[in-house]
Image (tube, helix red, strand yellow):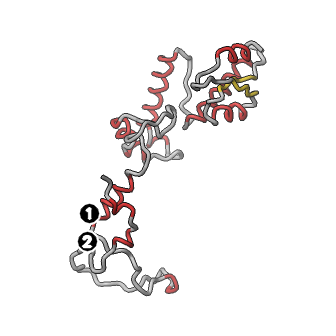
Amino acid sequence: MRNQTATQLLFEMSKAGRGTIVFPESDVPPVTSLPAIDAAHLATELLPLPEIAEPDVVRHFVNLSTLNMSVDSHFYPLGSCTMKYNPKRHERLARLPQAATSHPYQPLDQIQGLLSILFEMQGMLAEISGLPGISLHPAAGAQGEFTALLTAAAYFKDRGEKRTRVLFPTSAHGTNPASAAMAAMKIVAVACDANGNIDVADLRAKAEA
């Protein structure tokens, strides 16, 4: 059963005199104000913050978190997006400070390890797919769609073929046709049956049109 205290605000749970943490007395002389801060911006009285024991605060937010839909509690069908289920060991590796704290404009000599990982991954994906090259530049599913469409357009242009139509099932995610529109492609909707599957007859007719 869900703890009903999760529906209460922290202010409603507050009890006067119930502090969270008791700090030892400071051996540093007190400072009443900072010269760098204008007096108009200094607080003149204590804020009416809730007084709650730390375990109650933890339980409060844990209970609230159970109201969220997450990959650990529900089926989440978006396969190419970040919020899909990722193996926990992968999440741990992605959060390593050497990667998570790097900056796009960081000097190259400081991120050689990360660049090495990306370079090796490009080679692995190229070998698996049989393609001559792989780009890791797209940072999201929709960016990947857009990049792939631009690549396909360049391929057909190089071959002298004028293919501008992209077929999408009516059940497709909205970013799919949006990516095609941004790539200056013509969007052609393909019907689906009652179960959400592609209508093969409609697909064949529009592919041959």
* 1 or 2: mark nearer the eye: 1
Near-viewer residue (126 or 202): 202
Q: From the top left corner, tell me how far across and down residue 183 is, in percent.
A: 72, 31
Residue at image mark 2? 21
The C terminus: image quadrant: top right
Task: Identify the residue at horizontal 44%, vertical 45% (top origin).
Answer: 69
Task: Identify the residue at horizontal 56%, vertical 21% (top origin).
Answer: 133
18 over 144 or under it: above or below? below
Q: Is residue 176 left or right of residue 205?
A: left
Task: Identify the residue at horizontal 73%, vertical 28% (top origin).
Answer: 187
Residue at image mark 1? 55
Please name the amino acid that badge 2 sits on. Answer: Ile
Q: Earlier in the sequence, mark 1 or mark 2?
A: 2
Splitting the image into 4 quarters, where does residue 75 fall?
top left
Near-viewer residue (181 or 171): 171
Near-viewer residue (101 or 142): 142
Q: From the top left corner, tell me how far across and down residue 176 is, in percent.
A: 64, 32
Q: Is residue 168 left or right of residue 5?
A: right
Task: Identify the residue at horizontal 72%, vertical 33% (top origin).
Answer: 181
Report crowding for label 1: few under 14, some 14 to 19, many 20 or more residues within 10 A (C-alpha).
few
73 over 8 or under it: above or below? above
Please name the amino acid that badge 1 sits on. Answer: Pro
Splitting the image into 4 quarters, where does residue 74 fall?
top left
Asked which secondary structure carries label 2, the reply is loop
